[in-house]
Image: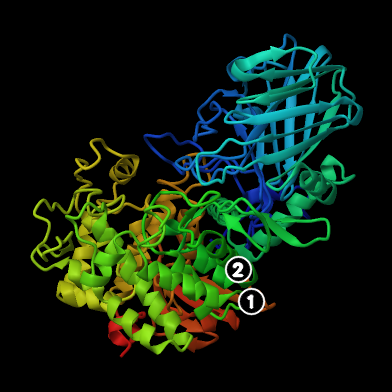
Amino acid sequence: MFKQVVIATPLITTLFGCSPPLPETTNEQFSLVEKDLVQYVNPLMGTDSTFALSNGNTYPAIATPWAMNFWTPMTAPMGDGWTYKYDDNKIRGIKQTHQPSPWLNDYGAFSFMAITGELQFNEDDRASWYSHKAEHASPDHYSVYLADYDVTAEVTPTERAAQFRFTFPDADNAFILLDAFNKGSMVKIIPEERKIIGYARNNHGGVPDNFHNYFVAEFDTPFSVTHTWHDEWQLKPDSLQSEGEHVGAIIGFSTQKGEQINVKVASSFISLEQAELNLKREIGKDSFEQTQEKANASWQKELSRIQVQDTNLEQVRTFYSALYRVLLFPRKFYEYDENNNIVHYSPYNGKVLPGYMFTDNGFWDTFRAVFPFFTLMYPDLNAQIMEGLANTYKESGWLPEWASPGHRNVMIGSNSAINISDAYLKGIRGFDIDTLYEAVLKNANVNEGRPLTSVGREGVDYYNKLGYVPYDVGIHESAARSLEYAFADFNLYKLATALGKDDDAARFYEQAFNYKKLFDSETGWMRGKNEDGSFDQNFNPLKWGDAFTEGNALHYTWSVFQDIEGLKSLMGGNEAFVDKLDAVFEMPPVFDDSYYGFTIHEIREMQIVNMGNYAHGNQPIQHMIYLYNYAGAPWKTQYHVRNVMNKLYKPTPDGYCGDEDNGQTSAWYVFSALGFYPVTPGSNQYVMGSPLFDKVTLSLNDGKSFSVTAKGNQDNAPYIQSATLDGTPLHKTWISHQQLVKGGELTLEMGTTPNKERAIDIAAFPYSLSLEK
């Protein structure tokens, strides 16, 4: 890390290419981070995952930031959510994907594959052996050698289009296949225009009846063969069109060694005409190299918003690989019409309407750090996302909680309110806050007409009457829902106050304390409560699920983001609170999986990392590490934050410790590496941890910059000895949003032993609702 180092000249030459000669040794501080930041991103990070054990549950997304379409190699069969598994040996094609998670699966997908020799188009028969040794993956470019066919396949993306390049051997029979997938598809070959057009309708829910993903593929080489296939892989020789449950197109060529065939492809959820327009606008006459240069520039622009200075290249690669994941979702689900107006196909009512739309996001995950990151670094983008939320409400009558592309019936909470409130409270404007306020009030009040249990608030009538969702009324995960509703209510209290809605503010202020109704003083944990006010008698704090969501009482008890001071009081004060935090890390990774009937992957991922019952691979507990700051033991936060960053994140296929989930687990790392974390969206504070790098500089939206410098930083020196903000001593364990966005420098002196005297009294503690009035 940016410290006194001795660097040999050959190492620098290797890393930098033709660098000017350096002295044989030097005591100068030197950073190995180059200006080309895209090179540090590994899209394969997290791809070594299965249903039983996740190391990220990611796929290599070849895309531009927040793009409408991604592209990825397929090692798994059509319809398998684990579309690319690092340990698989064969590739079946490279597909356009919109998948946010293997659990949600894909929609509107179709793929390209190149083969030579005997015609094989069934996805199992056409699959080719490949090796990671002959594979290149970067956000802006993917290349793979298809060994069975001696073909190199490449793709480079735009937001709504892409270019493919296939390099063939000498072959009398060379083919490119377009597989439009099942659940409804059409292909039409137009030889005179060297085109294939069609649509793909595959989905796993969340779409209206008229859903189509229309595509157009334009080739630079005339076709010598044209076939299609129909349902159940029935070949239709010498045909130009097929439509059915599952169809595809086959075009053939005679190629010479090294001959390259290029394909320009675009799609649209609106129409074939719009797909043609997207192709013309985003690629036009550009070469493959020009498209790649533009994609590379789009990533370089966003990655360079955070400039790292350090000497640990593995950590640099981990950081930029994680940042890449943060910048993928939510997906831009809008297009530009012929007059350059922003329009979108509504995944809620099937109409083509004006305005923004974003999708493929689960707010249960991303309210915690992804959206606070956007609020800090991308306020203009966040305003567009908020406007998209207003459009979702207008088109469906409800806010999205998990959208892919429309409402999906997964997860819990009322977390859209948190994202809306946090954005508005931190000064973001340019969106319809009146409509969104109407929407969040509907979520908090109305049970009738909810299209799915995940939309609105399941159990809202019970919650508004009792202050919690009862355990014994047939509503699963009742305690988790109650705790999340209370935090949403805190955000509604803050938003109502800012909007001058005093009566609403008073109501939601009181409801923000509803977490107290679930705290069981006998066990010291949050616990499911029956309608009559008695606690669940089957309670086991180690039991996953049941009253909680993908966790147990040891994880969800800390979900009082808004009032840690109040939670401490329930537990008996600072010392008891710290002891209880410690216990989660220090106990063995024991668990009760009886609710599920088997050991779900989230449990297994907790068990195997040797961190007790701390389950960083899932989202509910990720903020817990920072809570030592609220109880006079900030050095314990510093130790655990650094330990998790170093131990559980690597720029490798097994580089995560659980579900990555739309950027949230990555956003935890990105914020933590900077040295602070947004524990309480809706407040104006970021709670301090232990910065990973020697120096990091944020380029903020208005041209200002904020830097964090960690002096004396070492792997064995995670402890903050002292802090200054713009040269003034900082004695708190947090910094405000206003301090960050105005620009400046946070300087930290780091050490190998804890400073147990710094920031340990209540004046140094971060925000808690109990301390507000």
Q: Position of residue 254 (x, y in %)?
A: 86, 15
Instruction: Give SS at disc 1.
Output: loop
Q: Residue at x 72, y 16 (%)?
A: 149
Left/right placement of residue 278 relative to residue 25 reads: right
Please name whichever residue, 496 or 170, is drawn nearer the observer in this view of the structure. Answer: 496
Q: Please indicate, yes or no, whether residue 214 appears anywhere in the rendered image.
A: yes
Is 229 situated left or right of 638 in this image?
right
Residue topped by disc 2 = 387
Q: Amino acid at mark 2?
A: Glu
Question: Label 1 sits on what residue type?
Answer: Gly
Give the colour scheme shown: rainbow
The quarter of the displayed image where residue 726 is located: bottom right
The alpha-carbon separation of the residues under discs 1 and 2 comes to 8 Å
Residue 739: % across, % down: 53, 83
Residue 430: numbered disc = 1
User: Is residue 253 or residue 512 the one in the foreground?
Assistant: 512
Q: How many marks?
A: 2
- Front in this rendered view, residue 672 or 208: 208
Tell me where residue 253 appears, x and y as whole percent: 84, 18
Q: Quadrant of the C terminus?
A: bottom left
**Label placed on residue 332:** none
The residue sitting at 46% across, 75% down in the picture is 749
> Which percent across, then down, holds residue 499?
48, 85
